[in-house]
Structures are given as structure tokens and as C-alpha cells.
Image: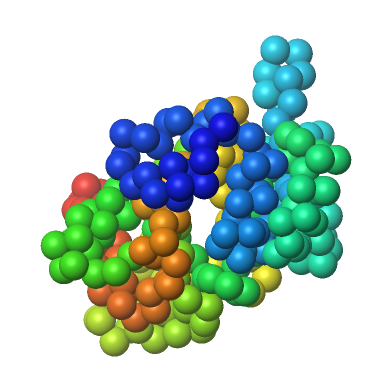
């Protein structure tokens, strides 16, 4: 098992695949203890007749990575002891992080996300953690409150919020955390891992310009392809 320093300190993309073998329980406890993120266990994948199916038993939209019960928000804990207890009972459960508490998440497509990341690095912006999902989505962690302010920020930049593929997850939502596996096609990974340097999250206003630009460019290219 990786030490805390190894897990939190690695940022290179080449290291990302290694996290797939880490224990879900250990990661859930780390997120609660080291990042003070609330966590709760979701569904998981099970082998059924040679296929991986969601433990919920239905043909769901996010197999292996959604809440088990409607009252999931009451199950979330920021305690390492509580997280250890929950994953000890359901060790295969996905790791889900409620948004709107210690962070919000700005969701964009993978292509727009990596374009925005490149621009952010050139602009020397301070980034928080960023995840990539197997369905080619990226989630940028920012300070809580982003869900209410992002639409106006997007408008001020000249974009119509509904016309670009940019969604903010705030109160009442959650995101899946690494190394959760989704749909039998892959695991959630860190594009930018949690580190001591990004413990203090950026405000959405700091990241929205490169994110909206990347999403707007992607939308324009999509329109051009259909003409």
C-alpha cells in the first residue's frame, strides 16, 4: 500500500494507472482524514453471467457509481473512523463525495478539460484536484458556492450557459472519486491529484475563463461539423 506522502505527492500523469489497485477503503479514509471531504459508499460492479452489472440490479445510467438510497446525504461522513466502518461493511462500494459542502465541482468534457488545463498552466493559475471519468468527463474541484455564481460568470464572458457543455455540481449532488470503477469500462482517475499545494481550493471565478473558452470552442467546432 502506498504511503500517505506517496499518494498525496504524486502529480505526474504517468502515475495515474497505479491507483486502480489501491483499496477503496484506504482511499475513502484518506479523503475523510486528510482532505476533510465527506464520503459515502455507493453501488458497485458485480459479475453476472460474464458481464459486470451494477449492484442495484437495474440498467442504470452510472453502473457501479451512484447512490444506493435517496437519503444518501444523511449517510455521508467526514470521519475517517466512520468511513472505515462503512467500507468495512461494503468493501466493493464506490467512493462518492457530496458536493456543496467542502467543495463544488465544475464538469466539462474531457477534450475541453484538457484544453483548459493547458491554458491554466500557461496562465500559472492555482488548481485544485481534477478527476477524469471513463465516460470522458472531467471535474474541477473549486470552493463551495460555484453552482450559484457560475451561470452569471459565463454570461459575463459572452457565452450562453445552456449553449456550452459546462455544468456545476453543488448542494444535492455528488461526484465519484478514484479509484471507483464505472460501467465496467474503467476507473475514475486523477488528472490532478490532491496535494498539500492544492489543499486550498480556487474560487470558480479563477478558473471559469479558460473553462468557458474551451467549452465554447468545442461547441463552435461541433456546429461547424454539422453545417
Q: In which quarter of the image is residue 214?
A: bottom left
What is the quadrant of the N terminus in the image? top right
State whether residue 101 is above or below residue 127. below
Residue 182: x, y in percent? 59, 37
Res 125 quadrant in image: bottom left
**Res. 143 in view:** yes
Q: Which of 106 and 26 is in front in this view?
A: 26
The image position of residue 99, as x and y in percent, is: 60, 67
Query: With 141 as the anchor, is 163 left or right in this view?
Result: left
Residue 21: x, y in percent?
A: 55, 28
Given residues 181 and 211, the one toward you in this image is 181
Residue at image point 56% right, 62% down: 35
Relative depth, front residue between 113 and 189: 189
- 203 relative position to 46: left or right: left
Q: Is residue 100 above or below residue 1?
A: below
- Vertical relation: 92 (above or below) 70: above
Q: In this view, does 45 lie above or below 218?
A: above
Q: Say which residue appears at 42% left-offset and 72% top-offset.
A: 201
- Residue 188 appears in view: no
Apparent side of residue 78 relative to residue 179 in the rendered image (left or right): right
Q: Quick one: which residue is furthest to the top in this view?
A: 50
Q: Where is residue 216 in the image (x, y as percent from the top left)?
A: 26, 65
The single residue placed furthest to the left in the displayed view is 122
Display colour scheme: rainbow
Task: Residue at 63%, 35% (x, y): give it.
Answer: 23
What's the residue at 73%, 40% (across, down)? Answer: 93
> From the viewer's perspective, is 55 left or right of 109?
right
Q: How many marks?
A: 0
Amino acid at each position: 500500500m502506498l504511503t500517505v506522502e506517496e499518494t498525496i505527492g504524486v502529480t505526474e500523469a504517468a502515475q495515474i494507472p497505479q491507483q486502480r489497485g489501491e483499496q477503496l477503503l484506504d482511499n475513502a479514509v484518506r479523503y475523510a482524514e486528510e482532505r476533510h471531504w465527506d464520503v459515502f459508499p455507493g453501488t458497485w460492479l458485480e459479475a453476472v453471467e460474464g458481464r459486470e452489472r451494477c449492484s442495484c440490479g437495474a440498467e442504470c445510467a452510472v453502473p457501479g457509481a451512484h447512490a444506493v438510497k435517496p437519503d444518501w446525504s444523511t449517510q455521508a461522513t467526514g470521519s475517517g473512523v466512520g468511513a472505515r466502518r462503512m467500507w468495512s461493511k461494503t468493501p466493493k462500494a464506490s467512493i462518492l463525495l457530496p458536493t456543496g459542502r467542502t467543495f463544488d465541482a465544475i464538469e466539462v468534457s474531457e477534450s475541453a478539460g484538457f484544453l483548459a488545463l493547458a491554458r491554466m498552466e500557461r496562465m500559472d493559475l492555482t488548481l485544485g484536484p481534477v478527476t477524469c471519468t471513463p465516460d470522458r468527463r472531467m471535474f474541477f474541484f473549486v470552493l463551495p458556492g460555484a453552482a450559484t455564481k457560475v451561470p452569471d460568470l459565463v454570461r459575463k464572458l459572452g457565452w450562453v450557459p445552456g449553449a456550452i457543455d459546462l455544468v456545476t455540481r453543488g448542494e444535492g449532488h455528488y461526484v465519484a472519486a478514484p479509484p471507483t470503477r464505472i460501467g465496467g469500462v474503467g476507473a475514475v482517475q486523477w488528472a490532478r491529484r490532491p496535494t498539500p499545494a492544492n489543499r486550498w481550493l480556487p474560487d470558480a471565478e479563477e478558473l471559469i475563463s479558460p473553462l468557458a473558452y474551451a467549452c465554447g470552442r468545442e461547441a463552435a467546432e461541433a456546429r461547424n461539423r454539422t453545417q
